[in-house]
Amino acid sequence: MNCRARVFGDDINTDYIVASRRKRDSLDPQVLCQYLFEEIAPQFAASVQADDAIVAGKNFGCGSAMEVAVTAVLGAGIRAVLARSFARTYYRNAVNNGLLPVIADTSRIREGDQLRIAGGAVYNETTAETIATEPLPDIMRAIIEAGGLVPYFRERRDFPS
């Protein structure tokens, strides 16, 4: 996966990703994505491109367990979030909805860097650096590749033993 880095810091909570009041307006990903990071980066939603990846520090997705915080990201065409660590609920919501959560040392990735995510590593093509990632269990990779938990079940009808 090739992508452009869109960089945020530590402790990006779900209300920063999309304000909880927005889910009262709509649950449509195409509507929600218009409000991505509106509280902390008002221009982000208008500038996001489908090949962007969110890059953050520690504890990405902390706060409430709002699934719409993943839905809004996917609605913008973003397919991966790289962070030093994730809140557990956001991580699971990401996998269950087909968003790739990548745990890696993101400290040297800068805004706009061109990245390639493949084979257990992030290749920063801007700086020619290779960054190791934490391995994703096979079942999680299969769920993400299917587009999320629901499509996974529709396709396979069961989890492997």
Image (cartoon, rainbow, N blue to C red):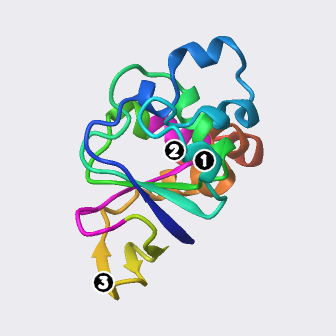
Q: Nearer the viewer, residue 98 or 138?
A: 98
Image height check: is 21 above or below 102?
A: above
Residue 129 is labelled as 3
Give the distance between the C-alpha atoms of the residues marked 3 and 2, in whole angstroms: 26 Å
Asked if labels 2 and 1 touch by Cβ distance under 8 angstroms, the answer is yes
Give the distance between the C-alpha atoms of the residues marked 1 and 3, in whole angstroms: 27 Å
Instruction: Give the label, 1 or 3, closer to the camera.
Output: 3
Of pointers 3 and 2, the one earlier in the residue sequence: 2
Left/right placement of residue 96 relative to residue 132 reads: right
Residue 33 picture quarter: top right
The three-letter code of the residue at mark 3 reads Glu
Give the distance between the C-alpha atoms of the residues marked 1 and 2, in whole angstroms: 5 Å
Q: At x 66% / y 36%, what residue is drawn?
A: 34
Q: At x 51% / y 59%, what residue is drawn?
A: 53
Left/right placement of residue 154 relative to residue 159 reads: right
Residue 28 is labelled as none
Dot 3, how many residues are within 10 Å of its Cα: few (below 14), some (14-19), or many (20+)? few
Dot 1, how many residues are within 10 Å of its Cα: few (below 14), some (14-19), or many (20+)? many
Image height check: is 80 above or below 32?
A: below
Q: At x 61% / y 53%, what residue is drawn?
A: 47
Q: Does residue 44 belong to the magenta stretch?
A: no
Q: Nearer the viewer, residue 160 or 57?
A: 57
* Residue at the spot of label 1: 98
* Residue at the spot of label 2: 95
